[in-house]
């Protein structure tokens, strides 16, 4: 075995050991069937690490920094998201696996298990908050489309950052309550098995958080154009983060989701900005 192959195998062993550690830690915080699934995946990762250990002759410790990152993601956002992101990053190792299959036949078995068995197990995970992902999409989409448009229109119509910010905040809070109520009634009438109260909370809370982030620049900058530019940049960043989350959890293409949401949001903002210019011109409004 040459030095390059040995280093590759040592990295595989380190990765498997780290993932075994992460799955064990996550399993300890979860109950029911999800716990059994995570424990099964953890056992598989440990088995793979031991296979690599036969070739390296070394005992490896998990990467605590990497493990900490995924565990925090799981706790703060979603354990399904953290696991699928971890497995997605593991796909990059496939090319390296193929380069050592001739020297180490067991690499083919490990690669097949990584590609098939673990995918089947992660597909079985059932996380309650992901059942309400439609409510979250509704909340964030509406907030982005409606508020970026409203703030763009208000920016040119009023040209006063404090007034624009206050108007946008009041509008956004009212809209978040309205959206939550609508989602409650909609979920209740559809009888999908989801909790109408939880659906309303997810929709309303994510709407409100988006509103606060979009309105904040108007309380930080004196120039309404600067505030608008920062608001639009914030909207794009929110879209990027949220579509990345969706693309990992739902295993969809990031670029398509990102472009769709961005074009809709910015399209409405541009149209509303034009309406603001037209309204100011037609009604000859001057605000000191």
Image: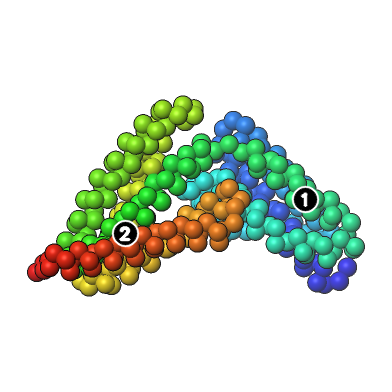
- Taking 207 as reference, is 192 left or right? right
Visible residue check, residue 15: no
Visible residue check, residue 227: yes
In this view of the protein, which residue sits in the foreground, 231 or 41?
231
On the image, the x and y values in percent for residue 261 come to 46, 57
Answer with the quarter of the image where residue 231 lies.
bottom left
Answer with the quarter of the image where residue 230 lies.
bottom left
Numbered-mark total: 2
Mark 2 or mark 1, whichever is nearer to me: 2
- Taking 265 as reference, is 129 left or right? right
Please tell me which residue is depicted at 48% across the width and 48% down the height of the picture: 77
Q: Label 1: how many residues lie within 10 Å, few (<14), some (14-19) or many (20+)?
A: many
How far separated are the C-alphas under marks 2 and 1?
52 Å
Q: Which residue is mark 2?
A: 149
Q: Label 2: how many residues lie within 10 Å, few (<14), some (14-19) or many (20+)?
A: many
Q: Quadrant of the N terminus?
A: bottom right
Q: Which residue is mark 1?
A: 48
Please tell me which residue is depicted at 90% across the width and 62% down the height of the picture: 102
On the image, the x and y values in percent for residue 68 come to 55, 54
């Amino acid at each position: 075995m040459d030095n390059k192959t040995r280093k590759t195998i040592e990295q595989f062993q380190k990765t498997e050991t780290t993932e075994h550690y992460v799955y064990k830690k996550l399993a300890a915080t979860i109950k029911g069937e999800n716990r059994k699934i995570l424990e099964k995946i953890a056992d598989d990762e440990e088995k793979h690490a031991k296979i690599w250990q036969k070739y390296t002759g070394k005992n490896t410790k998990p990467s605590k920094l990497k493990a900490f990152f995924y565990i925090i993601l799981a706790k703060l956002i979603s354990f399904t998201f953290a696991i699928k992101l971890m497995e997605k990053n593991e796909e990059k190792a496939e090319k390296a696996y193929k380069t050592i299959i001739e020297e180490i036949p067991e690499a083919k078995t490990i690669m097949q298990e990584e590609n098939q068995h673990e995918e089947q197990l992660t597909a079985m995970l059932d996380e309650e908050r992901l059942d309400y992902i439609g409510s979250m999409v509704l909340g964030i989409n509406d907030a982005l489309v409606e508020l970026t448009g409203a703030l763009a229109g208000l920016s040119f119509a009023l040209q006063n950052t404090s007034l624009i910010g206050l108007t946008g905040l009041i509008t956004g809070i009212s809209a978040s309550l309205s959206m939550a109520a609508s989602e409650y009634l909609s979920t209740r009438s559809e009888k999908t098995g989801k909790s109408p109260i939880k659906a309303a909370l997810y929709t309303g809370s994510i709407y409100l958080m988006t509103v606060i982030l979009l309105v904040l620049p108007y309380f930080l900058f004196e120039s309404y154009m600067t505030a608008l530019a920062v608001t639009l940049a914030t909207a794009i960043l929110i879209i990027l983060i949220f579509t990345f989350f969706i693309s990992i959890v739902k295993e969809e293409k990031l670029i398509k989701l990102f472009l769709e949401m961005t074009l809709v949001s910015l399209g409405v903002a541009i149209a509303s900005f034009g309406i603001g210019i037209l309204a100011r011109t037609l009604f000859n409004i001057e605000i000191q």
